[in-house]
Image (spheres, grey):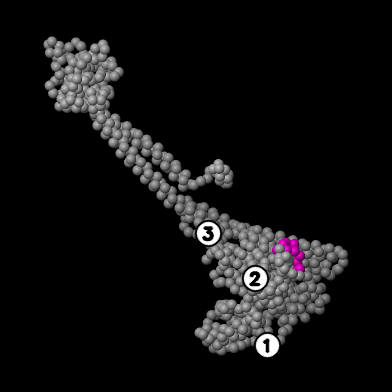
Amino acid sequence: MRVLLVEDDPDISRQLKQALGDAGYAVDHAADGEEAHYLGENEPYDVVVLDLGLPKIDGVSVLERWRREGKTTPVLILTARAAWSDKVAGFDAGADDYLTKPFHTEELLARLRALLRRAAGHAAPSLSCGGLRLDPRAARASVNGEPLRLTSLEYRLLHYLMMHQGRVISRTELVEHLYDQDFDRDSNTVEVFVGRVRKKIGSDRIETVRGLGYRLVPLEGEAAA
Amino acid sequence: MSGEAQAPAENGRGRPREGSLVRRLIALAAGWILVALILTGAVLTTFFKQAALSRFQDGVAEIAEGLLAGTTVSADGKVAAPDLIDARSLRTYSGTYWQIAEPTPAGIHPLSRSRSLWDADLDGPPKGLEQAIARLGKPVFYDAVGPDGRPLRAVAIVALLPERTEPLIFMAAQDRTPVDQDARRFATLTWIALLLLGGGLVAAVLLQVRVGLSPLFDLGRAIAQVRQGKAQRLTGVWPREISPLAGELNALLDHNQEVVERQRTHVGNLAHALKTPISVMLAETERHPGELAEVVSRQAAAMRGHVDHHLRRARAAARAQTAGERTLIEPVMDELAVTLERVFQDKGVVIDWRAPEDLWFRGERQDFLEIAGNIMENAGKWCRGRVRADATPSGPGRLTLTVEDDGPGLPADRRDQALKRGARLDESAPGSGLGLSIVDELVRAYGGRLTLGDASMGGLKVVVELPAAET
């Protein structure tokens, strides 16, 4: 397994190179954002450990560039910035995990193992509907190439609608697929989630069929394209 | 009793001059108006009284002068008054009287008098005849009492007639009651008019002060709105005298914001600077086990706790000072839910959240992220797979965030402990670690409350009450 370690502090870099090497990884090291971006773009890494405070280009920008260029390599952010606003920004930029300094080396290794395991999950065919794409393997969805940020309940709703494109699906059927058997549901649950998903994918993609339920439709302009 | 009740009110502010600006302005204006009106009234009434009396005296003097001009003295020395001096002097007690007298050592001796006097005499000047003799031929005025007891204004002229060696005194008098009545009536009318004028002026001043100072009251309301989070700055058009003040207040708000931002940056830099060396130390101790490594590791962990605690605390203190910020809750909850599900991806945590689209937190976005993020992370850490988060308005200017999980929960006797600082990191019970104690401090800085309870789905329930901004 090849790992790219992006870290500007020489002591931490030395320690991590050693620890990762001991754990059986092949480690490349980059000490600034520019070098990190170049390496990540051109070498087939299995996982990246990325510091945020970097010389030249900061970590979030590097990550955003990779994701824009279509790189899906799992990235773990390793930073001293522990505020939730930083965490949210990191995941927003496309991070897969986030670990704050100071940390235990064991924890970092465990998280890397989890990331690799997830990335190696079973391949499943991705679903699409107009400009909407849904990748069940990574549990990711995108609209016109832009990644969507969905919570798991929203993802479940969209997944179910996409699996049954064009069919009218009743509220009861939807709520049964959203929640486990023993979940306490409030009466307007489906409306709430349909509203949220509409906000994220465009309101006219989910049609309300009065008295019957909802239906996912490809937009005409995009279906042609 | 009243003395005791007043004392704290006087000492309360410790300022020598307090009270109402409006009242002070009105008291000053009213005082000045009172003095001016009293002076005006006094001058007017005195002047009127003197003018009326002077005209009245002229009439009396005319009678005396007619008497003097028409009086004849016969060869044998008998004094004869003119036939008709004034018709009124013919009627008894008519109020118009005359008399001709001659001076005697004891006083005066009347020689002839008007019929109106009947058998009474007119008194001479109370101060004697010296003044009248000294001013021979000129009238001397004085007050006297008529035969019917009414007040009179009298005049005496001492003159020498060519036929007589001895001087004669020509006297006339008239009832002065009508003049006094006129003066009194005038005075009454004058004082009533001045009183009305004074009342009108004070009312006008009151109106002027209220209208004139109204921008000050508006300013107070605008500042209150900023403090309540309904506005970020002072907006609107202010009068020229107030607008520098409004400008300064806005500058102060901006400065406040800037200071907070700067402090936050410093704090963040310090955190970054300290955490990396601690990381290095921790990793080094892991690689070289031994007694020294154990001590260093323990101390490094403690340092990490202190750094976290004190830096967050400093930030909490800095942020509670800022006014005027507000944060829409729904998008923050969405971001947090997406992020946290990603964090707990391996565990497959489902976060079910609800928030009205128009609910605002009165405070900064970062802080709401920190509060909700830490609580929901704690729930995610201990749940078996489900976290439920609800943000709802609760009463005017308040909102409640409830986070529940389906984990093992926290026994009631350990709940206080969970909010205490110093609980060790990564302990094996929900709510321990720094997470909830940091949230508790932050919530308190916003004047809110954090309580722990039992969730209906089995785990821990965290309820946070926070200030809401009104929409």
User: Is circle 1 on the same chain as circle 2?
Assistant: no
CA separation in Å, label 1 and label 2: 34 Å
Label pair 2/3, CB-CB below 8 angstroms? no
Residue B236 in picture, x, y percent from top left: 48, 59
Q: Amino acid at mark 3?
A: Gln
- Judge depth for marks 3 and 1 and give the one in front: 3
Q: Which residue is mark 1?
A: A124
Secondary element type, mark 3: helix
Q: Is residue B171 left or right of residue B465?
A: left
Out of A32 and B191, give the one closest to the viewer. B191
Secondary element type, mark 2: strand
Query: Is residue B69 visible in this depiction of the protein?
Result: yes
Q: Is residue A171 above or below residue B66?
A: below
> In the image, which residues are magenta?
B417-427
Asked if residue B419 lies in the magenta stretch, the reply is yes
Secondary element type, mark 1: loop
Specify the quadrant of the image occupied by residue A189: bottom right
Residue A11 in picture, x, y percent from top left: 79, 67
Mark count: 3
Q: Is residue A84 above or below residue B35?
A: below
Q: Residue at x 16, y 13 (%)?
A: B162
Residue B156 in picture, x, y percent from top left: 23, 20
Out of B468 and B248, give the one closest to the viewer. B468
Q: Main secondary structure of the magenta part?
A: loop
Q: Residue at x 80, y 70 (%)?
A: A15
